[in-house]
């Protein structure tokens, strides 16, 4: 059987079959096409502006390593004019994070980028090893996720950087969409599908340049570029709920390779129906069209959106035609009962969640630490309060070494002391 020829250059021997579209392609064409798609995603969504300082959330894994490599390449090739910095979070997981940070340190030298490492122990007084010892392996990823998000923002603020990019890929976004659907969390779904997220409560925005890149293609890129990355999975992650969503999506991908991008686009379509005041006043850049970034996904179809809106309107019209049935009253009843209000069989439902109504989330600032939150007390402070109850007579001072150039959030948090109950 003759060897396959690259479908792009029509010359070299095909060495890669793209998981995204089953395209047979040679090694060099694959690297070029992958980089071009990331560039088109960046341009289509206006992710950067010239002279901007950008922090790359670097964990040492394949995603963040590929992101750092691609951004360095594109920054030089297309003259973005960016000042790139590696920002790593040390969660305090022995045998995992300490080893991966060594990889990040090597990447900093290889890519000639400055590196900043921020630790949970310095920020919160807890390492993840200590958290797991306290709460167990069930639900520990909740603590890590909440702490990590705040730690990235605080690390960026320390460096005076207002833009953080993360290595979230199409598989990650699809998993998040599936998780929020299973939880029935529509407001969070709207935020998680955005390629750029920001809030009036924080000066720092985030973006996901690899949003439409398949995880398998990221691995192929790292392999063919011979990138130095850490591949061991977190020792605590197998218990995470995300693992169940990941397994489901991988099974779907085996049957239909395009299912990952289909789920991402479905999440985007549903998020478009959520009003900004419901989704937490999180603004996002224009979503990239499938053809614009070369990912092969469907473009947002105006006809399908009109159909969805008509269905919603039809449901509301049908609800207005519901007949209210009143319970009959006996004439011989005492006067006290006669004076009671007539009860509808729908009243029980109206006492709970109103049909078709979504609770609004208004983003503000935590009254304790100043970090953005839809509640009076942010999730991180709530989690810390629970953890610190086991530490009587103990105080943890949360501060920042260098206040100059910090945001309002950081100046507010500098003098806060969280005391154990």
Image (cartoon, rainbow, N blue to C red):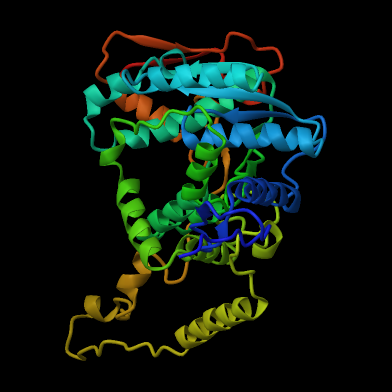
Q: Position of residue 5 (x, y in %)?
A: 58, 60
Q: Is residue 311 visible?
A: yes
What residue sits 68% from the left and 64% below the top?
Answer: 291
**Rendered view: 421 above or below 153:** above
Q: Residue at the far front: name it.
A: 1
Q: How far across and down, in percent of the image, does residue 119 sit?
A: 46, 17
Whether residue 410 is visible to the viewer of this picture, yes or no, is no
334 or 251, which is in the foreground? Answer: 251
- Out of 54 and 342, give the one closest to the viewer: 54
Q: Which quarter of the figure is the C terminus placed in?
A: top left
404 and 353: which is toward the camera = 404
User: In the drawing, does residue 77 fall left or right of residue 409?
Assistant: right
- On the rendered image, what quadrant is the N terminus found in? bottom left
Asked whether, in this view, residue 411 is left or right of residue 59, the answer is: right
**Residue 261: image location, x then y, percent:** 52, 61
The residue under the point 48% across, 23% down is 89
Q: Residue at x 40, y 61 (%)?
A: 253
In the displayed structure, 67 sits above or below 177; it is above
Would residue 123 appear left or right of 194 to someone viewing this image? left
Work out whether 118 lies above or below 221: above
Nearest the viewer among 138 and 86 is 86
Q: Quadrant of residue 236?
A: top left
């Amino acid at each position: 059987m003759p060897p396959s020829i690259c479908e792009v250059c029509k010359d070299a021997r095909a060495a890669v079959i793209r998981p995204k579209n089953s395209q047979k392609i040679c090694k060099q064409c694959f690297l070029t096409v992958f980089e071009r798609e990331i560039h088109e995603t960046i341009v289509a969504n206006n992710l950067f502006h010239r002279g901007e300082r950008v922090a790359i959330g670097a964990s040492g894994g394949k995603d963040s390593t590929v992101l750092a490599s691609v951004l360095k390449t594109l920054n030089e090739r297309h003259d973005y004019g960016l000042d790139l910095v590696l920002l790593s979070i040390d969660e305090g997981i022995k045998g995992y994070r300490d080893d991966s940070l060594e990889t990040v340190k090597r990447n900093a030298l290889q890519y000639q980028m400055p590196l900043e490492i921020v630790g949970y122990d310095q920020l919160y007084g807890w390492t993840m090893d200590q958290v797991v010892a306290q709460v167990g392996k069930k639900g520990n990823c909740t603590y890590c996720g909440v702490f990590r998000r705040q730690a990235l923002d605080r690390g960026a603020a320390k460096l005076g950087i207002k833009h953080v990019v993360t290595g979230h890929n199409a598989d990650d976004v699809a998993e998040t969409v599936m998780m929020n659907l299973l939880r029935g969390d529509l407001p969070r779904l709207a935020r998680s599908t955005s390629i750029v997220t920001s809030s009036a409560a924080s000066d720092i925005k985030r973006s996901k340049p690899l949003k439409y890149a398949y995880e398998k293609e990221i691995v192929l890129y790292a392999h063919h570029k011979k990138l130095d990355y850490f591949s061991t999975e977190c020792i605590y992650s197998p218990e995470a709920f995300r693992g169940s969503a990941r397994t489901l999506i991988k099974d779907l991908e085996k049957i239909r390779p395009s299912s990952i991008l289909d789920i991402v686009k479905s999440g985007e379509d549903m998020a478009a129906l959520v009003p900004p005041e419901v989704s937490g006043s999180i603004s996002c850049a224009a979503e990239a069209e499938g053809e614009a970034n070369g990912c092969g996904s469907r473009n947002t179809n105006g006809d399908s959106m009109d159909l969805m809106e008509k269905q919603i309107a039809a449901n509301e019209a049908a609800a207005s035609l519901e007949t209210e049935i009143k319970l009959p009253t006996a004439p011989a009843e005492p006067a006290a009962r006669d004076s009671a209000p007539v009860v509808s069989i729908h009243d029980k439902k109206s006492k709970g969640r109103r049909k078709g109504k979504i609770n609004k989330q208004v983003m503000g600032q935590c009254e304790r630490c100043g970090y953005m939150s839809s509640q009076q007390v942010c999730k991180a402070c709530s989690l810390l309060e629970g953890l610190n109850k086991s530490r009587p007579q103990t105080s943890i001072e949360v501060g920042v070494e260098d206040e100059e150039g910090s945001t309002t959030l950081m100046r507010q948090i500098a003098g806060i002391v969280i005391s154990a109950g």
